[in-house]
Amino acid sequence: MFDSLKKKLQNIRTKFASNIEDAAGAEPEPQVAELPEGAETEEPVSTPAARPEAEAAEEPVHEGRESPTFFEKVKVLVREREVLLQEKDVEEPLFELEMVLLENDVALPVTDEIIARMRRDLVGRRRKIGASVDDLVVSTLRSALCGVLGEGLDLSRYIREHERPVKILFTGVNGTGKTTTVAKVGQYLQKNGFTVVIGAGDTFRAGAIEQIRTHADRLGIKTIQHQAGADPSAVLFDAVQYAKAHDIDVVLADTAGRFHNRANLMNQLEKIRRVMKPDLVVYVDEAVAGNDAVIRADEFNKAVGTDAVVLTKADMDPKGGAAISVAHTVGKPIIFLGTGQGYDDIMPFQPRAVVNELLGDEA
Ligand SMILES: Nc1nc2c(ncn2[C@@H]2O[C@H](COP(=O)(O)OP(=O)(O)O)[C@@H](O)[C@H]2O)c(=O)[nH]1
Ligand SMILES: [Mg+2]
Protein backbone atom coordinates (compact mmCIF):
# COMPACT_ATOMS: atom_id res chain seq x y z
CA MET A 1 0.00 0.00 0.00
CA PHE A 2 1.26 3.50 -0.91
CA ASP A 3 4.60 2.05 -2.00
CA SER A 4 5.52 4.87 -4.37
CA LEU A 5 5.03 7.54 -1.72
CA LYS A 6 6.81 5.42 0.88
CA LYS A 7 9.90 5.08 -1.28
CA LYS A 8 9.99 8.78 -2.10
CA LEU A 9 9.62 9.75 1.54
CA GLN A 10 12.57 7.54 2.36
CA ASN A 11 14.73 9.51 -0.12
CA ILE A 12 13.52 12.81 1.30
CA ARG A 13 14.44 11.67 4.79
CA THR A 14 17.99 11.00 3.68
CA LYS A 15 18.16 14.42 2.06
CA PHE A 16 16.89 16.23 5.17
CA ALA A 17 19.23 14.23 7.37
CA SER A 18 22.30 15.06 5.32
CA ASN A 19 21.42 18.78 5.22
CA ILE A 20 20.83 18.87 8.95
CA GLU A 21 24.04 16.95 9.58
CA ASP A 22 25.89 19.56 7.49
CA ALA A 23 24.26 22.38 9.41
CA ALA A 24 25.16 20.72 12.72
CA GLY A 25 28.74 20.19 11.53
CA ALA A 26 29.03 23.88 10.75
CA GLU A 27 28.06 24.82 14.30
CA PRO A 28 30.69 25.08 16.99
CA GLU A 29 30.97 21.83 18.94
CA PRO A 30 29.21 21.97 22.29
CA GLN A 31 31.80 22.41 24.96
CA VAL A 32 32.19 19.38 27.14
CA ALA A 33 34.24 19.51 30.28
CA GLU A 34 37.56 17.77 29.91
CA LEU A 35 37.92 14.52 31.76
CA PRO A 36 40.93 13.97 33.95
CA GLU A 37 43.06 11.00 32.85
CA GLY A 38 41.54 7.67 33.82
CA ALA A 39 38.36 9.33 34.98
CA GLU A 40 35.89 7.00 33.26
CA THR A 41 35.09 4.99 36.34
CA GLU A 42 35.44 6.22 39.87
CA GLU A 43 36.91 9.70 39.69
CA PRO A 44 34.76 12.82 39.62
CA VAL A 45 34.09 13.73 36.01
CA SER A 46 34.25 17.47 36.28
CA THR A 47 34.23 20.31 38.70
CA PRO A 48 32.25 23.50 38.26
CA ALA A 49 35.52 25.35 37.81
CA ALA A 50 36.38 23.30 34.72
CA ARG A 51 33.19 24.24 32.90
CA PRO A 52 32.38 27.25 30.74
CA GLU A 53 30.97 30.16 32.73
CA ALA A 54 27.42 30.14 31.40
CA GLU A 55 26.93 26.45 31.89
CA ALA A 56 28.41 26.39 35.34
CA ALA A 57 25.83 28.97 36.34
CA GLU A 58 22.96 26.65 35.29
CA GLU A 59 24.34 23.68 37.18
CA PRO A 60 23.40 23.07 40.78
CA VAL A 61 26.14 24.07 43.19
CA HIS A 62 27.41 21.26 45.39
CA GLU A 63 28.99 22.99 48.30
CA GLY A 64 30.94 20.77 50.57
CA ARG A 65 30.38 17.71 48.35
CA GLU A 66 33.34 16.30 46.47
CA SER A 67 31.82 13.82 43.95
CA PRO A 68 29.02 14.61 41.51
CA THR A 69 26.17 12.14 41.53
CA PHE A 70 25.89 9.40 38.92
CA PHE A 71 23.26 11.38 37.00
CA GLU A 72 25.40 14.49 36.94
CA LYS A 73 28.21 12.45 35.44
CA VAL A 74 25.97 11.00 32.77
CA LYS A 75 24.58 14.41 31.90
CA VAL A 76 28.05 15.68 31.13
CA LEU A 77 29.17 12.58 29.25
CA VAL A 78 26.22 12.19 26.89
CA ARG A 79 25.35 15.77 26.33
CA GLU A 80 23.23 15.84 23.18
CA ARG A 81 24.24 17.71 20.10
CA GLU A 82 22.07 20.65 19.24
CA VAL A 83 21.52 22.49 16.02
CA LEU A 84 19.89 25.77 15.13
CA LEU A 85 18.51 25.30 11.65
CA GLN A 86 18.00 28.14 9.24
CA GLU A 87 15.73 28.37 6.23
CA LYS A 88 18.62 27.73 3.85
CA ASP A 89 19.40 24.41 5.55
CA VAL A 90 15.96 22.96 4.82
CA GLU A 91 14.82 24.92 1.79
CA GLU A 92 15.87 22.32 -0.75
CA PRO A 93 14.53 19.18 0.97
CA LEU A 94 11.31 21.03 1.81
CA PHE A 95 10.86 21.88 -1.85
CA GLU A 96 11.51 18.27 -2.81
CA LEU A 97 9.04 17.08 -0.20
CA GLU A 98 6.45 19.47 -1.63
CA MET A 99 6.99 18.02 -5.13
CA VAL A 100 6.78 14.44 -3.86
CA LEU A 101 3.52 15.11 -2.04
CA LEU A 102 1.95 16.80 -5.05
CA GLU A 103 3.13 14.07 -7.44
CA ASN A 104 1.53 11.52 -5.14
CA ASP A 105 -1.87 13.20 -5.26
CA VAL A 106 -1.75 15.00 -1.96
CA ALA A 107 -4.07 17.99 -2.40
CA LEU A 108 -2.36 21.37 -2.70
CA PRO A 109 -3.75 22.95 0.50
CA VAL A 110 -2.84 19.81 2.42
CA THR A 111 0.67 19.79 0.94
CA ASP A 112 1.04 23.46 1.95
CA GLU A 113 -0.07 22.60 5.46
CA ILE A 114 2.45 19.75 5.79
CA ILE A 115 5.29 21.95 4.51
CA ALA A 116 4.30 24.79 6.84
CA ARG A 117 4.27 22.42 9.81
CA MET A 118 7.70 21.03 8.89
CA ARG A 119 9.14 24.52 8.48
CA ARG A 120 7.64 25.69 11.77
CA ASP A 121 9.13 22.69 13.57
CA LEU A 122 12.58 22.92 12.04
CA VAL A 123 13.55 26.49 11.24
CA GLY A 124 14.84 28.92 13.83
CA ARG A 125 14.49 26.54 16.71
CA ARG A 126 17.29 24.95 18.63
CA ARG A 127 16.75 21.22 18.27
CA LYS A 128 18.52 18.36 19.94
CA ILE A 129 19.70 15.81 17.45
CA GLY A 130 20.91 13.05 19.73
CA ALA A 131 22.58 10.08 18.12
CA SER A 132 20.69 10.11 14.82
CA VAL A 133 19.68 13.06 12.70
CA ASP A 134 17.17 10.79 11.00
CA ASP A 135 15.23 10.54 14.28
CA LEU A 136 14.70 14.29 14.22
CA VAL A 137 13.57 14.19 10.59
CA VAL A 138 11.19 11.29 11.15
CA SER A 139 9.65 12.78 14.27
CA THR A 140 9.08 16.10 12.50
CA LEU A 141 7.59 14.40 9.45
CA ARG A 142 5.47 12.15 11.63
CA SER A 143 3.98 15.03 13.55
CA ALA A 144 3.31 17.01 10.34
CA LEU A 145 1.50 14.04 8.74
CA CYS A 146 -0.42 13.16 11.90
CA GLY A 147 -1.38 16.83 12.15
CA VAL A 148 -3.18 16.77 8.80
CA LEU A 149 -4.63 13.27 9.20
CA GLY A 150 -6.42 14.25 12.40
CA GLU A 151 -8.07 11.77 14.69
CA GLY A 152 -9.56 8.56 13.34
CA LEU A 153 -12.95 7.22 14.34
CA ASP A 154 -13.16 3.92 16.20
CA LEU A 155 -16.45 2.46 14.98
CA SER A 156 -16.75 -0.22 17.68
CA ARG A 157 -16.33 2.39 20.36
CA TYR A 158 -18.80 4.70 18.64
CA ILE A 159 -21.41 1.92 18.62
CA ARG A 160 -20.80 1.02 22.26
CA GLU A 161 -21.30 4.65 23.23
CA HIS A 162 -24.50 5.26 21.26
CA GLU A 163 -28.09 4.21 21.53
CA ARG A 164 -28.89 1.06 19.51
CA PRO A 165 -29.58 0.48 16.77
CA VAL A 166 -26.80 2.62 15.35
CA LYS A 167 -27.83 3.50 11.79
CA ILE A 168 -25.11 3.90 9.18
CA LEU A 169 -25.90 5.20 5.69
CA PHE A 170 -23.34 4.61 2.92
CA THR A 171 -23.24 7.09 0.04
CA GLY A 172 -21.05 7.93 -2.93
CA VAL A 173 -20.72 7.65 -6.70
CA ASN A 174 -21.04 4.44 -8.76
CA GLY A 175 -18.57 1.59 -8.66
CA THR A 176 -16.39 2.88 -5.82
CA GLY A 177 -17.11 -0.10 -3.58
CA LYS A 178 -20.12 0.89 -1.44
CA THR A 179 -21.86 -2.46 -1.59
CA THR A 180 -18.65 -4.42 -0.98
CA THR A 181 -17.85 -2.08 1.91
CA VAL A 182 -21.27 -2.64 3.48
CA ALA A 183 -20.58 -6.39 3.42
CA LYS A 184 -17.04 -5.98 4.80
CA VAL A 185 -18.19 -3.65 7.58
CA GLY A 186 -20.99 -6.11 8.38
CA GLN A 187 -18.49 -8.89 8.87
CA TYR A 188 -16.11 -6.63 10.80
CA LEU A 189 -18.87 -5.68 13.21
CA GLN A 190 -20.01 -9.27 13.66
CA LYS A 191 -16.45 -10.25 14.50
CA ASN A 192 -16.44 -7.48 17.08
CA GLY A 193 -19.50 -8.92 18.75
CA PHE A 194 -22.27 -6.76 17.28
CA THR A 195 -25.45 -7.91 15.55
CA VAL A 196 -26.14 -6.42 12.14
CA VAL A 197 -28.94 -6.02 9.62
CA ILE A 198 -28.44 -4.73 6.08
CA GLY A 199 -30.95 -2.57 4.19
CA ALA A 200 -30.84 -3.11 0.42
CA GLY A 201 -31.28 0.58 -0.38
CA ASP A 202 -29.98 0.42 -3.95
CA THR A 203 -33.30 -0.27 -5.68
CA PHE A 204 -32.17 1.62 -8.76
CA ARG A 205 -29.41 -0.39 -10.46
CA ALA A 206 -30.36 -3.75 -11.98
CA GLY A 207 -28.99 -6.62 -9.93
CA ALA A 208 -28.03 -4.44 -6.97
CA ILE A 209 -30.48 -6.08 -4.55
CA GLU A 210 -29.25 -9.58 -5.48
CA GLN A 211 -25.63 -8.43 -5.13
CA ILE A 212 -25.96 -7.22 -1.54
CA ARG A 213 -28.24 -10.15 -0.69
CA THR A 214 -25.62 -12.64 -1.89
CA HIS A 215 -22.92 -11.01 0.24
CA ALA A 216 -25.18 -10.86 3.28
CA ASP A 217 -26.29 -14.50 2.91
CA ARG A 218 -22.66 -15.65 2.78
CA LEU A 219 -21.95 -13.72 5.97
CA GLY A 220 -25.10 -14.87 7.73
CA ILE A 221 -26.51 -11.33 7.90
CA LYS A 222 -30.23 -10.60 7.52
CA THR A 223 -31.14 -8.39 4.55
CA ILE A 224 -34.25 -6.20 4.38
CA GLN A 225 -35.27 -5.70 0.77
CA HIS A 226 -38.15 -4.52 -1.40
CA GLN A 227 -38.76 -4.86 -5.13
CA ALA A 228 -36.44 -3.26 -7.66
CA GLY A 229 -37.54 0.32 -8.28
CA ALA A 230 -39.12 0.69 -4.81
CA ASP A 231 -38.55 3.82 -2.71
CA PRO A 232 -35.22 3.31 -0.89
CA SER A 233 -36.49 5.39 2.05
CA ALA A 234 -39.18 2.80 2.66
CA VAL A 235 -36.69 -0.09 2.52
CA LEU A 236 -34.34 1.56 4.97
CA PHE A 237 -37.19 2.58 7.27
CA ASP A 238 -38.19 -1.08 7.39
CA ALA A 239 -34.59 -2.12 8.12
CA VAL A 240 -34.55 0.22 11.13
CA GLN A 241 -37.90 -1.11 12.35
CA TYR A 242 -36.59 -4.66 12.02
CA ALA A 243 -33.48 -3.79 14.05
CA LYS A 244 -35.59 -2.21 16.80
CA ALA A 245 -37.93 -5.20 16.96
CA HIS A 246 -35.06 -7.70 17.11
CA ASP A 247 -32.58 -5.82 19.29
CA ILE A 248 -30.05 -5.57 16.48
CA ASP A 249 -27.07 -3.32 17.22
CA VAL A 250 -26.36 -1.85 13.81
CA VAL A 251 -28.25 -1.08 10.57
CA LEU A 252 -26.04 -0.82 7.48
CA ALA A 253 -27.76 0.92 4.57
CA ASP A 254 -26.53 0.34 1.04
CA THR A 255 -27.61 2.97 -1.51
CA ALA A 256 -27.42 3.57 -5.25
CA GLY A 257 -24.45 5.47 -6.62
CA ARG A 258 -25.10 9.12 -7.36
CA PHE A 259 -23.33 12.32 -8.25
CA HIS A 260 -23.65 15.31 -5.98
CA ASN A 261 -24.79 17.50 -8.90
CA ARG A 262 -27.79 15.35 -9.87
CA ALA A 263 -30.65 17.06 -8.11
CA ASN A 264 -33.24 14.27 -8.24
CA LEU A 265 -30.92 11.64 -6.75
CA MET A 266 -29.67 14.05 -4.12
CA ASN A 267 -33.26 14.85 -3.17
CA GLN A 268 -33.85 11.13 -2.81
CA LEU A 269 -30.85 10.94 -0.47
CA GLU A 270 -32.25 13.85 1.51
CA LYS A 271 -35.51 11.94 1.90
CA ILE A 272 -33.61 8.83 3.03
CA ARG A 273 -31.93 10.96 5.66
CA ARG A 274 -35.23 12.34 6.92
CA VAL A 275 -36.89 8.94 7.09
CA MET A 276 -34.04 6.76 8.29
CA LYS A 277 -32.35 9.36 10.54
CA PRO A 278 -28.86 7.88 10.20
CA ASP A 279 -26.38 8.32 13.06
CA LEU A 280 -23.49 8.27 10.62
CA VAL A 281 -23.44 9.19 6.95
CA VAL A 282 -20.39 7.49 5.50
CA TYR A 283 -19.02 8.68 2.17
CA VAL A 284 -17.30 5.93 0.16
CA ASP A 285 -14.79 6.64 -2.59
CA GLU A 286 -11.77 4.93 -4.04
CA ALA A 287 -8.23 5.87 -3.02
CA VAL A 288 -7.09 5.27 -6.63
CA ALA A 289 -9.17 8.28 -7.70
CA GLY A 290 -6.62 10.47 -5.88
CA ASN A 291 -7.49 14.14 -5.88
CA ASP A 292 -10.83 13.49 -7.62
CA ALA A 293 -11.89 11.46 -4.60
CA VAL A 294 -10.90 14.31 -2.29
CA ILE A 295 -12.84 16.88 -4.34
CA ARG A 296 -15.91 14.63 -4.60
CA ALA A 297 -15.85 13.88 -0.88
CA ASP A 298 -15.80 17.60 -0.16
CA GLU A 299 -18.67 18.29 -2.57
CA PHE A 300 -20.75 15.45 -1.11
CA ASN A 301 -20.11 16.76 2.36
CA LYS A 302 -21.30 20.22 1.36
CA ALA A 303 -24.37 18.84 -0.42
CA VAL A 304 -25.69 16.27 2.05
CA GLY A 305 -23.26 16.14 4.95
CA THR A 306 -20.75 13.46 5.79
CA ASP A 307 -19.68 12.11 9.16
CA ALA A 308 -16.88 9.80 8.05
CA VAL A 309 -15.14 8.55 4.92
CA VAL A 310 -14.19 5.08 3.67
CA LEU A 311 -11.48 4.91 1.01
CA THR A 312 -11.56 1.66 -0.95
CA LYS A 313 -8.98 0.14 -3.30
CA ALA A 314 -6.06 1.34 -1.20
CA ASP A 315 -4.42 -1.93 -2.26
CA MET A 316 -4.31 -0.60 -5.83
CA ASP A 317 -3.09 2.87 -4.90
CA PRO A 318 0.69 3.34 -4.71
CA LYS A 319 0.32 7.07 -4.06
CA GLY A 320 -1.73 7.49 -0.92
CA GLY A 321 -2.51 11.14 -1.59
CA ALA A 322 -6.27 10.75 -1.13
CA ALA A 323 -5.76 8.98 2.19
CA ILE A 324 -3.54 11.82 3.40
CA SER A 325 -5.76 14.61 2.07
CA VAL A 326 -9.34 13.63 2.54
CA ALA A 327 -9.75 13.98 6.31
CA HIS A 328 -8.08 17.40 6.37
CA THR A 329 -10.03 18.65 3.35
CA VAL A 330 -13.46 17.42 4.42
CA GLY A 331 -12.81 17.90 8.11
CA LYS A 332 -14.20 14.41 8.85
CA PRO A 333 -12.26 11.29 9.79
CA ILE A 334 -11.43 8.36 7.55
CA ILE A 335 -13.00 5.38 9.24
CA PHE A 336 -11.75 2.45 7.11
CA LEU A 337 -9.48 1.68 4.19
CA GLY A 338 -10.58 -1.02 1.75
CA THR A 339 -7.59 -3.15 0.89
CA GLY A 340 -8.92 -5.81 -1.51
CA GLN A 341 -11.97 -7.64 -2.76
CA GLY A 342 -12.34 -10.15 0.08
CA TYR A 343 -14.53 -9.58 3.13
CA ASP A 344 -11.48 -9.41 5.38
CA ASP A 345 -9.86 -6.73 3.25
CA ILE A 346 -10.78 -3.80 5.43
CA MET A 347 -8.55 -1.89 7.78
CA PRO A 348 -9.72 0.47 10.53
CA PHE A 349 -7.95 3.72 9.77
CA GLN A 350 -5.60 4.64 12.57
CA PRO A 351 -3.69 7.77 11.56
CA ARG A 352 -0.61 6.94 13.59
CA ALA A 353 -0.35 3.41 12.17
CA VAL A 354 -0.72 4.72 8.62
CA VAL A 355 2.00 7.30 9.20
CA ASN A 356 4.28 4.64 10.67
CA GLU A 357 3.62 2.49 7.62
CA LEU A 358 4.46 5.42 5.32
CA LEU A 359 7.66 6.15 7.20
CA GLY A 360 8.61 2.49 7.19
CA ASP A 361 8.62 2.40 10.98
CA GLU A 362 6.95 -0.06 13.29
CA ALA A 363 7.26 2.15 16.33
N1 LIG B 1 -9.07 -4.05 -5.16
C1 LIG B 1 -10.17 -3.66 -4.52
N2 LIG B 1 -11.38 -3.77 -5.13
C2 LIG B 1 -12.48 -3.37 -4.45
C3 LIG B 1 -12.38 -2.85 -3.13
N3 LIG B 1 -13.65 -2.53 -2.74
C4 LIG B 1 -14.46 -2.84 -3.76
N4 LIG B 1 -13.78 -3.34 -4.80
C5 LIG B 1 -14.30 -3.79 -6.10
O1 LIG B 1 -14.88 -2.67 -6.78
C6 LIG B 1 -15.94 -3.10 -7.61
C7 LIG B 1 -17.19 -2.27 -7.35
O2 LIG B 1 -17.65 -2.55 -6.05
P1 LIG B 1 -19.15 -2.32 -5.57
O3 LIG B 1 -19.19 -2.65 -4.14
O4 LIG B 1 -20.11 -3.02 -6.45
O5 LIG B 1 -19.29 -0.74 -5.82
P2 LIG B 1 -20.59 0.20 -5.65
O6 LIG B 1 -21.10 0.44 -7.02
O7 LIG B 1 -20.07 1.47 -5.06
O8 LIG B 1 -21.55 -0.48 -4.78
C8 LIG B 1 -16.14 -4.58 -7.30
O9 LIG B 1 -15.51 -5.33 -8.31
C9 LIG B 1 -15.42 -4.78 -5.97
O10 LIG B 1 -14.93 -6.10 -5.80
C10 LIG B 1 -11.08 -2.75 -2.52
O11 LIG B 1 -10.90 -2.29 -1.39
N5 LIG B 1 -10.02 -3.18 -3.26
MG1 LIG C 1 -23.55 -0.89 -5.04
Image (tube, rainbow, N blue to C red):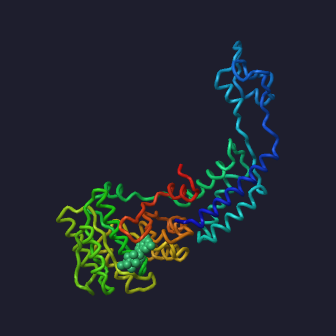
How many numbered marks are there?
0
Could you say which is closer to the camera, residue 269 or residue 184? 184
- Spot occupied by residue 174 in the image (x, y as percentages of width and height): 41, 81
Q: Quadrant of residue 142?
A: bottom right
Residue 268 percent location from the top left of the image: 34, 82
The picture places residue 29, in percent across and down from the top left corner, at: 80, 39
Q: Is residue 335 above or below residue 19?
A: below
Q: What residue appears at the point 34 percent right and 57 percent down from the top-left corner?
A: 156
Instruction: Work out whether residue 121 or residue 45 is closer to the camera in this orientation and state it.
Output: 45
The outermost residue toward the top is: 64
Residue 249 higher or lower than 134, as above or below: below
Q: Is residue 171 something one can see in this rendering?
A: no
Q: Name the image quarter holding residue 182.
A: bottom left
Relative placement, left or right, of 88 versus 65 is right
| Horizontal relation, residue 268 to residue 106: left or right | left
Residue 234 in percent (x, y) is at 24, 79
Please state if 245 lies on the left or on the right of 12 as rendered: left
Side of 233 where 18 appears, left or right: right
- Whether residue 148 is visible, yes or no, is yes
